[in-house]
Image (cartoon, grey):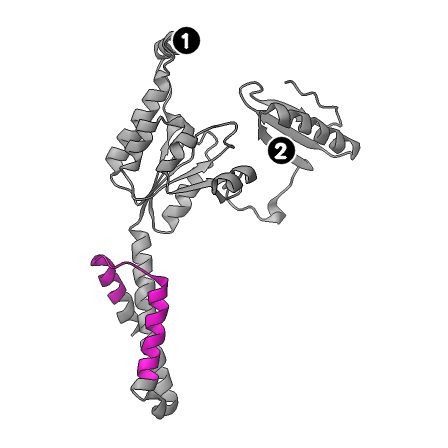
């Protein structure tokens, strides 16, 4: 009976039947009630109960099979810079779950040679036009053209695209999602958010003010058991450059030094690309603003 239920679920999926958890549990319960009460399975004692249970379990497995079949046919595309190769773990995890997942890595598009770099520099200076940005936007649209329609598209850098490009991306999916990797004060994209079905943010104020869905920052890395970890520091902190944040980092560094802890702080940004505050040998860190 269970095997028959699985096959029926795949058949329903092929016919375009939509999965519903409510329908799954209601039909399972009704099947048991119908077999055990309405058809008087209760009069057959233990055998009647077991037969009614197996019949209802077959219905349950039908919808479980339908759910899994729908997931395995789902197409999801992630669009992001991914300079640090973190987002590839999202794609790999989705693929392991049987989802047809793809990653369009924006950062893979760079200047082909020095001439392109020079021309782009002149274009930005005199025409206020970034040719590399246009090249990257075209790359994303060309990639989507090859991939075809997607059930969901996740854009991790909505500020990367102009409004017209986002509208074209929107045409390739039924559900467009974005994750705001920074707050709206630093990276304003309010004029583009209406295109997205769901907006995720880690910033508490943005979530409360705009009704975004709260989610923490993420770094997907392979799990390493505690026994295999051998940290050399008491604290490691990496953050983007921000004038207000730098003053807080100074206070944090001072407290860590006072407690005799070993730490490393990396501030990454346009004004402080890769400045490190270290206390490996109990040195007083210097912060360049």
N-term mark: 1 or 2: 1
Residue 111's place in the image compared with 85, above or below, is above
Provide residue 106's location: percent of width, then percent of height: 38, 28
Q: Residue furthest left?
A: 15
Residue 272's place in the image compared with 35, above or below, is above
Give the labeled residue for mark 1: 125
Q: Is residue 14 magenta?
A: yes
Of residues 233 and 40, which is closer to you in this image? Answer: 40
Under circle 1, the secondary element is: helix
Report the predominant secondary structure element of the magenta stretch: helix
- Residue drawn at 58 percent across, 20 percent down: 272
Provide residue 163's location: percent of width, then percent of height: 34, 28
Mark 1 or mark 2, whichever is nearer to me? 1
**Which disc, if any, is residue 237?**
2
Q: Is residue 187 magenta?
A: no
Snapshot quadrant of residue 234: top right
Provide residue 157's location: percent of width, then percent of height: 42, 31
């Amino acid at each position: 009976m269970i095997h028959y239920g699985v096959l029926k679920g795949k058949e329903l999926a092929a016919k375009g039947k939509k999965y519903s958890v409510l329908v799954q549990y209601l039909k399972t319960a009704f099947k048991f009630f119908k077999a055990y009460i309405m058809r008087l399975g209760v009069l057959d004692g233990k055998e009647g109960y077991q037969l009614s249970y197996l019949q209802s379990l077959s219905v349950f497995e039908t919808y479980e099979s339908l759910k899994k079949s729908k997931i395995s046919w789902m197409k999801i595309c992630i669009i992001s810079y991914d300079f640090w190769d973190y987002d590839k773990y999202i794609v790999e995890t989705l693929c392991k779950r049987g989802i047809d997942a793809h990653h369009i890595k924006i950062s893979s598009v760079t200047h082909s040679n020095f001439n392109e770099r020079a021309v782009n520099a002149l274009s930005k200076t005199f025409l206020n036009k970034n040719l590399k940005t246009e090249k990257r936007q075209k790359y994303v649209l060309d990639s989507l053209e090859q991939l075809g329609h997607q059930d969901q598209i996740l854009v991790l850098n909505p500020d990367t695209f102009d409004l017209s490009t986002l509208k074209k991306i929107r045409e390739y999916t039924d559900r467009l999602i974005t994750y705001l990797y920074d707050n709206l004060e630093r990276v304003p994209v309010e004029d583009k958010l209406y295109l997205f079905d769901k907006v995720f943010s880690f910033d508490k104020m943005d979530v409360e003010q705009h009704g975004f869905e709260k989610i923490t920052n993420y770094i997907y890395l392979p799990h390493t058991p505690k026994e295999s970890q051998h940290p050399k520091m008491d604290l490691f902190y990496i953050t983007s450059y921000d004038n207000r944040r730098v003053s807080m980092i100074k206070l944090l560094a001072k407290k860590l030094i006072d407690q005799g802890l070993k730490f490393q702080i990396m501030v990454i940004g346009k004004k402080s690309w890769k400045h490190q505050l270290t206390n490996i040998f109990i040195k007083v860190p210097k912060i360049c603003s």
